[in-house]
Image (cartoon, helix red, strand yellow):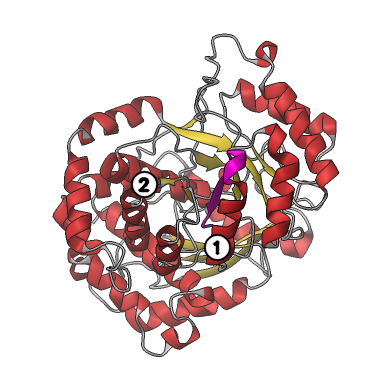
Amino acid sequence: MVDPSPKHNSERAHGDGAQPLVLVYLILYTSPKDGAEVVSYRGHESEAINAPVKEDSSLRGFGMTFTIGKGNEICCQAIASIVEEHLLGREVEPLFANMGEMWQLMASDPQLRWIGPEKGVIHLATAAAINAIWDLYTRSRSKPLWKLIVDMSPEELVKCIPFRYITDAITPAEALKILQGASKGKADREAEMVAKGYKAYTTSAGWSGYDDAKVARLTRSALEQGFNHFKLKVGADVDDDIRRLSLMRSIVDDPKQMPAGRKEPSPGSLAGKNAGPTGCVDVQEAIDYMEKLAHLRPWFIEEPTAPDDVLGHAAIRRGIKHLGICVATGEHAHNRMKFKQLLQADCIDVVQIDSCRLAGVNEFLAVMLMAKKFGKIVCPHAGGVGLCEYVVHLSLIDYICISAENERNVLEWADHLHEHFVYPVSINGAGCYNVPMDAQGGYSIEMLKGSIEDYSFPQGYYWKTGSARTAPPSGH
């Protein structure tokens, strides 16, 4: 057993007397005056935290699922139902010995499946529980999650993957062949990532509602930080979207704005270009919208219509392909079967897995392997509290173990609320994620005790007093 509490920060020690399950309904306040999504325009960063532990031990595992406020209490109840039924009282080493069986145990409750199956709140809750088990596992081995996975053999990884319902898209034998093929050069790719980090794109300048001065300031700041990719939220007002996109284009395409020593992206390649807008609604509306924005040369439109509408995505992709614009989706694709359909129907160019929407590491592996087979790139969604902490591990796993390519892959970076985490992720001067290296960092999702005490809802200090004892988010 190991003690995951670092010795360098007294606030991060959680004390003795660990309980089998701790559920926290947490809402981190975000200013209503700041930028917004087009549809989900009113909300706070919010999560349900799950911390199952091995009794009489300092070893803890943390998991969370992400919402934007209302509904967190439903997630908490669902997490409790899953964990209390299938985890409490179990020995952990038998779970670790076969993480594929663990996944089936957690995701296949015959009664809880009725309110899914494998989608909606029950799948969000399953994600929190399964990710907590992976966090517990990786802490017990004194490795960050990505390293635990990277060090597994192809055969061990295949045993972790839920192939039920997707063998018409990828079989265990095909997955094994992909993983074995990626084994060549794996050590070199790992060393490359540790040295350079994983390329990121930023959404900081792209929220709806920002005026010109703020868009310009945040865009120039992002360039100075090393970013080449910028995402904007669109769909509410085409004239306003064109204004913001044009302003951003005028800055990122101006050689005088390029920081000293920075290499400008090649004009002959899509790599390193604007990561593009998101957010239209109906199929034809999305196509028409992109016709109006095409002169600004976005790389892709993200989640352009209802996330369950596979045929709608296919129609949009056909309708804008002549514009040279790609389609990305997956933030709300709730399971591997939905991704299977999107890939089989050739609906998308960019696979945007969400670390809280899919049911944990096991299902991510399934989707990333399908993406590799179908020749699509994986660029995870990370626009919310804790998501950046999660997904850097997934992108590292994809590059090092599965795809063996990352020329065009980028990982979303949202520069807020990281200060609430014990092992926060960070960006280096080249606009890349630094690789999590702390041996006790696990899946990087443990939150500071003070943040939990302040923002737990409704009993937290902030929600009782209107102020927080923890420091406010830097720069916000």
Q: Earlier in the sequence, mark 2 or mark 1?
A: 1
Q: Nearer the viewer, residue 430 or 271?
A: 271
Q: Nearer the viewer, residue 329 or 262?
A: 329
Percent of width and height locating residue 26: 61, 63
Q: Quadrant of the C terminus?
A: top right
Give the side of residue 299 with respect to residue 176, left or right: right
- Identify residue type, mark 2: Gly
Q: Residues within 10 Å of mark 1 (few under 14, many from 20)?
A: many
Percent of width and height locating residue 175: 22, 56
Give the side of residue 402 with respect to residue 312, left or right: left
Examine the rendering and report whether any part of residue 320 can be seen.
yes
For numbered disc 1, what is the local secondary structure?
loop
Q: For mark 2, what is the residue?
A: 375
Examine the rendering and report whether any part of residue 131 can be seen.
no
Point out the stretch of residues depicted in magenta.
Answer: 321-332
Q: Tell me, yes or no, whether the highlighted magenta stretch contains residue 331.
A: yes
Give the side of residue 100 with respect to residue 36, left or right: left
Q: Determine the residue positioned at 24% across, 65% down.
A: 99
Percent of width and height locating residue 406: 38, 35
* Residue 332, numbered label: 1
